[in-house]
Image: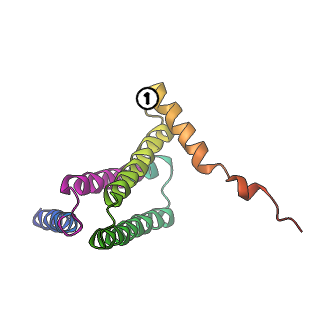
Amino acid sequence: MRQTTLNEGIIGGLGGLTAYLFGLNWELIFIWIIIMILDIISGIIKGKKLGWDSHKFKAGLLMKAYEALVILALLMLDRALSLMGIGIALGSIIIGAFILIDMLSILENGVQLGVKLPQVIVNYVSRAESIINEPKEEENHEPHD
């Protein structure tokens, strides 16, 4: 129990420090962290029910770590631009995009598990998944000789 409290304190402190350093609303950082944790939990539940693959799980955790690195790097860019007088709300847009990606993943896991969701959500997940997996137009064209 003590280790959990320590971990939560560390995560909360890092989230607060990151938000302070980059001038973001700290609540947005915490929402992203919570949604990311919920996405990991939903992936574990899906893995346990539909067949566990430890390699896929490790790869997923590594991707989450990489997402955090990407967000940190982009937030640094946002802060640097701000210091140069280029005011773009890049930080909030970045965090918001990753929140949406993780929410979509949670909903997709629920659909794959057979959770009864309102049809509008099932349709949204199916449509978003097909858009994400749809090859881009330039990928369909072969190079001209």
Residue 38 falls inside the magenta stretch:
yes
Q: Amino acid at mark 1?
A: Lys
Name the residue: 23% across, 59% down. Answer: 24
Mark 1 closeness class: few <14, some 14–19, many ≥20 residues within 10 Å:
few
Pointer 1: what residue? Answer: 116
- Residue at x 45% of width, y 52% of height: 47
Q: Residue at x 51, y 41 (%)?
A: 112
Q: Main secondary structure of the magenta part?
A: helix
> By what rule are the colours in the image chosen?
rainbow
| Front one among 112 and 50 | 112
For this orientation, the residue located farthest to the right is 145
Total marks shown come to 1
Depth check: give the residue in front, 118 or 86: 86
* Residue drawn where x is 24% and y is 67% of the image: 22
- Stretch of the chain drawn in magenta: 20-43
In which quadrant is the N terminus drawn?
Answer: bottom left
Of all residues shown, which one is farthest toward the top? Answer: 119
Percent of width and height locating residue 145: 89, 69
Q: Position of residue 143 (x, y in %)?
A: 82, 65
Q: Indicate the quadrant where residue 76 lies.
A: bottom left
Residue 11: x and y in percent read 20, 65
Q: 59 and 49: which one is in front?
A: 59
User: Dot 1: what SS?
Assistant: loop
Q: Quadrant of residue 98?
A: bottom left
> Looking at the image, is 112 positioned above or below residue 53?
above
Vertical order, 15 against 45 (above or below): below
Q: In the drawing, does residue 16 fall left or right of residue 104?
A: left
Q: Residue furthest left?
A: 2
